[in-house]
Amino acid sequence: MTTTELAVPLFDLRLTDADLDAVARALRAGELGSGPLVETFEERFASHLGARHAVAVSSCTAALHLAHLTAGVGPGDEVIVPSITFAATANAALYCGATPVFADIVGPADPQIDPDQVERLVGPRTRAVCAVHFAGYPAAVDRLRSVCDRRGIALIEDTAHAPLADLEGQALGTFGLAGAFSFFSNKVLSCGEGGLLCTDDDEVARRARTLRAAPGDGGTFDYGFDGPRAALLASRLDGLAADVAARRALVHRYRAALARIDGVSVPFRDADVDHSSCYVMPVLVDDPARRGPLRRALRDRHGIQTSLLYPSIHEFTAFRARYGEQHLPRSRDWSDREVTLPLYPHLTEEQQDRVVEAVTEELDA
Ligand SMILES: *Cc1c(COP(=O)(O)O)cnc(C)c1O
């Protein structure tokens, strides 16, 4: 089925006329590269986070790479990462010549990196911990920061899912040495391709700014950003609070409806929703054997697109071949049972009801 035939896509992007005008103005002004539009966006993003510095870069992968480099991660080091994430989280360690060491999640109701296991995994070669705020909900970065501070290692936050999310009022991305945001098309705040490193550390920001420039420009990586995308993000930042509020309202509504269905459970707690950016809507089927048939039936019979976030990456051939088998039963269980349901700010209640009814019908069958 093509996306045009879908009754409810997994994700849908809607830009306003104001967004399009902002990009047109940047193009008319000829600001195709770095310049004041990029700087203005960086200042606004930093101030909305309450961080000292924001450095816009070409992707979140680039931001994670710079975060690891400026944290001093290098060959022979280890970086502790979760397995329920996008491969870029672990690849950042690889780019620096370091080895990712995978920690399990807390459990099915809290699919975030387990701080107790992280503490046990810290060893003489550990240089950093990279926590992911999965689905936009806070990982235990308060506890992870105290583990990292005690051991003298860096905490890096992969905040690809989590703009405008917080842990007890403090913005995610501001707990560790650096945070790395993604502005990829399907993320909560998107411009196509883009990312950003935030930090309170003047030296980390200075080094990240130097490294992001192209080799001919005194830099190393050519990870820079440009005016039209910065203008689009600045315009979309105006609507971010409303977008996240709409996502939260839809998630509360999903949770109430899904709680009544047998055979499926919903992670996180109701009280967590209003601290999350609600990037995606994950649910767990009780019986892993029903996951594949359910996803196929939703697609073929109901026109509803779903996804799987994530297949546990410690089992990817690329990591297994290099670092051997690791036993992470809770991550494995999650990746066997998870289904990601459609969610975006302008998803209608009718579409949402259709998703809930289709899941009910297929699980009853
Ligand atoms: C999308 C994503 C990234 C990478 O973002 P890019 O901007 O595409 O490089 C990193 N980590 C997580 C958890 C992601 O979801």
Image (tube, helix red, strand yellow):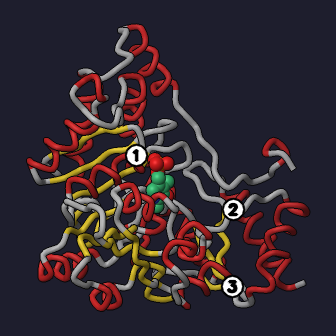
Q: Nearer the viewer, residue 321 or 364?
A: 321
The amino acid type found where label 3 is placed reads Val
Which secondary structure lies at badge 3? strand
**Residue 111 in view:** yes
The image shows residue 11 at horizontal and vertical percentages of: 63, 51
Work out how far the residue at label 1 is from the one at label 2, CA to CA, in angstroms.
21 Å
Give the mark, 3 or 1, whose residue is nearer the N terminus.
1
Decide if residue 262 is on the left or right side of residue 265: right
Decide if residue 180 is on the left or right side of residue 207: right
Occupied quadrant, residue 354:
bottom right
The amino acid type found where label 2 is placed reads Gln
- Check disc 2 and report the residue beneath it: 352
Give the mark, 2 or 3, whose residue is nearer the N terminus.
3
- Check disc 1 and report the residue beneath it: 240
The image shows residue 24 at horizontal and vertical percentages of: 46, 15
Q: Which of 245 and 27 is in front in this view?
A: 27
The image shows residue 85 at horizontal and vertical percentages of: 50, 67
Work out how far the residue at label 2 is from the one at label 3, CA to CA, in angstroms.
16 Å
- Mark 3 and ligand 1: say if the CB distance to the nearest ligand atom is below 8 Å: no
For the residues bearing labels 3 and 1, Cβ distance under 8 angstroms: no
What residue do we see at 19% from left, 82% from top?
A: 147
- Check disc 3 and report the residue beneath it: 264
Work out how far the residue at label 3 is from the one at label 1, CA to CA, in angstroms.
30 Å
Where does the C terminus fall, quadrant-wise?
Answer: bottom right
